[in-house]
Amino acid sequence: MAETITVLPQQLIDAMQKDTFALLSTIDFESGSPSMNAVSWLYAKDSETIRFAIDQRSRIVTNLRQNELVNVTYIGEGSVHAIYGKARQVTETLEGVPFKLACYDIDITAVRDAMFYGSRISVAPEFEKTYDKRAAEKLDAQVFDAMKKA
């Protein structure tokens, strides 16, 4: 991916169909500076849209109310992918989830290869949930199911 494109290539859509790790950047509503958070409840809805869920109390929600511009940084599939877009709220509260989560769609405006020249990512970042594994799997299933229905 040497040039800027405006849709997700199929390899990224496929990679973003499961529980994944990404960095979500917004513009802080108080300072106006970039603000970055790690997120895992996100997936590629299609080639033009990424959907994510976050706690309603998150500073991300306040930031998005002030400025809809976002960046998702996805590390994997051999590179660092910078995905730019505009976030819009799909629902204030996801149904069928034991926590109050808001759901957003990112309408993608650009996808760029952000890896430095002459290199590639050989191993994508991995993470593990540090609380009860069965509870984590159940919650993840509830959140992803609710996101797909929203």
Image (spheres, rainbow, N blue to C red):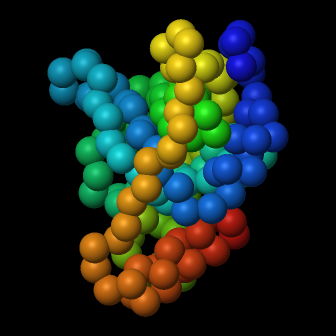
Residue toward you, 121 or 100: 121
Q: Position of residue 80 (x, y in %)?
A: 53, 29
- Residue drawn at the location 49% of the way across and 85% of the way down: 138
* Image quadrant in which the N terminus is located: top right
Q: Would you place residue 131 above or below residue 41 in this image?
A: below
Residue toward you, 122 or 88: 122
Extreme residue in the left direction:
31
Q: Position of residue 148 (x, y in %)?
A: 68, 66
Q: Position of residue 8 (x, y in %)?
A: 74, 33
Q: Is residue 74 visible?
A: no
Q: Position of residue 66 (x, y in %)?
A: 36, 29
Q: Would you place residue 60 above or below residue 121 in this image?
A: below
- Residue drawn at the location 37% of the way across and 67% of the way down: 128
- Residue drawn at the location 41% of the way across and 80% of the way down: 136
Q: How many marks?
A: 0
Q: What is the quadrant of residue 29 in the picture?
A: top left
